[in-house]
Amino acid sequence: MDTVQVKDRQFTLFIKGEEIQKQIARVAKQINCDYAGKTPLFICVLNGAFMFAADLLKRVTLPCQISFVRLSSYEGVSSTGIIKEIVGLTEDVAGRDVIVIEDIVDTGLTMKRMLHTLSERGPASVCVASLLLKPSKLQVKVNVHYVAMEIPDNFIVGYGLDYDGFGRNLPDIYVLADGGQSEIEKLKLLYYKMNKMLNIVIFGAPGSGKGTQSERIVAKYGINHISTGDVLRAEIKNGTELGQTAKGYIDQGQLIPDALMIDILASVFDGFKNSKGVIFDGFPRTIAQAEALKKMLAERGQEVTVMLDLDVPEDELMTRLIKRGQESGRADDNEETIKKRLTVYHSQTAPLIDWYKAENKYSHINGLGTMEGIFADICKAIDAVK
Ligand code: IMP
C-alpha cells in the first residue's frame, strides 16, 4: 500500500496523477468547446486550486484572462463551517464570462458564497470548474458545471489540497482511510462507480419496440439518447463542418465512412461528457464501428457499460410491422420488404452480438411481452452492471 505521512496522519494513495491529468484534459476540452468565440475570465480560488488551475489552463486554447482570489473554510480534517472573506477580487467582472476554478466542492458553502459575491458584480455568466466534488457532502444547492472527478466523503490531500497546510505538493491524491487495504479497495470501487458513465448500446429490429424502450431508459436513468440518424440530420441541418462532409457522401449515394461517423459521434458524446451517460441507438452497425466506438470511449476514460439486445421472434416482428403498415398506410410495410429489412438487420447484427458477447457486455432481453415487463427486464440488466 502506497502511503504518505502528512504531519500526524497517514494517507493512502487514492487517485494517481495520470488519472487526474486525463480527467483535467477532458474538462479543458469541454471548456474549449463550450466557450468557443468567447474570452472567459478564469478566477482561481487559492490556495487549493493552484495545481488544477495550472494544468487546466495549459490546455485551454481560448483567449482568456486569469485572476486569483483567496478564501478558506477548512481547519484540520473537518469543516469549520466558517467561511472567510474573499480576498483579491480586483478584476472588473461586469459583462464577463467568468469561470471559477476550485479544488473541491464539499459542503458547497464556500462556492455558494463565492457565486453570490460574483453575481452581484454583473457578469455575463458565471460557472464553476471544480477538480473534485463530494456529492454526498453537499449541504446547499450549487451548480458545479465542470467536475473532473467525483469522490466519496473521506478527507483527501495532495494535488493542491492540504492537511493543515501540508501535502499540497503531492502530485497524486491521497485519502485518509484508517480501515486498511479493504477500506481502500472499497473507496476505489466507489470512486470508479461515481465517475463511470452509463453507456448503453441498444439493438433491436424494426418493430422490436426499441424506440419506446430507449425513451423509458433515458427517463429513468437520466441519460441522453444518441441516435445516429438524428445526429446526422442535425449536423447537416446546422451546416457544421462534419455535417457538410457527411452530406457530400450522402448526396453521392455513398455510405458515410466509419472514421467520419465516429468523429461526429465523438463531438456529440463530448457534449454529454458531464452527464450520467448515453444510449447509442443505430450505432455501431459493424465490428469495425464497434471497435472504433470502444477506442473513442477509452480515449475519454469511458466504455460501453452494456449492450442490450432486444430480441423479438421474426413472426412477431412481421405481425407488428404489417399491422403498423396497415395503420399508417406506409407502402414499404408489406411482407416482402419487411422480410428484406429483417434479413438485413439480422445479418448486420449477428456478428456484433458475438463481438459484444466476447467483450462480456452482452445482455439478451426477451422482447416478447408487455412494455412494462420488458422494461423491468431491461432495468434488471442495467442495474446488474451499473
Ligand atoms: P466547502 O465550502 O465545504 O465546499 O469547502 C470547500 C473547501 O474546503 C475547499 O476549497 C478545500 O479547501 C476544503 N476541503 C474540503 N474537503 C477537503 C478535503 O478532503 N481535503 C482538503 N481540503 C478540503
Image (cartoon, grey):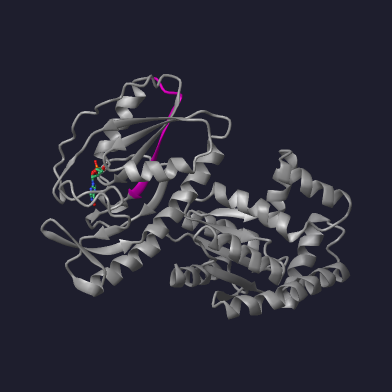
| Residue 97: x %, y % from top left | 46, 28
Is the residue 184 above or below the residue 91 in the image?
Answer: below
First to last magenta residue range: 122-132
Q: Quadrant of the C terminus?
A: bottom left
Please report the residue visible at 30 percent of the width from the left and 24 percent of the height from the top.
89
- Residue drawn at point x = 46 percent, y = 55 percent: 22
Residue reaching furthest to the front: 169
Look at the picture and state if 218 lies above or below 317: above
Q: Residue 124 colored magenta?
A: yes
Q: Quadrant of residue 315?
A: bottom right
- Which of the pair 194/342 is nearer the observer? 194
Secondary structure mostly seen in the magenta stretch: strand
At x 74%, y 77%, the residue is: 314
Examine the rendering and report whether any part of residue 249 can be seen.
yes
On the image, which quarter does residue 227 sit in?
A: bottom right
Residue 87 painted magenta: no
**From the viewer's perspective, is 260 left or right of 386?**
right
In this figure, what is the number of numbered marks?
A: 0
Residue 250 located left or right of residue 175? right
Q: Nearer the viewer, residue 352 or 371?
A: 352
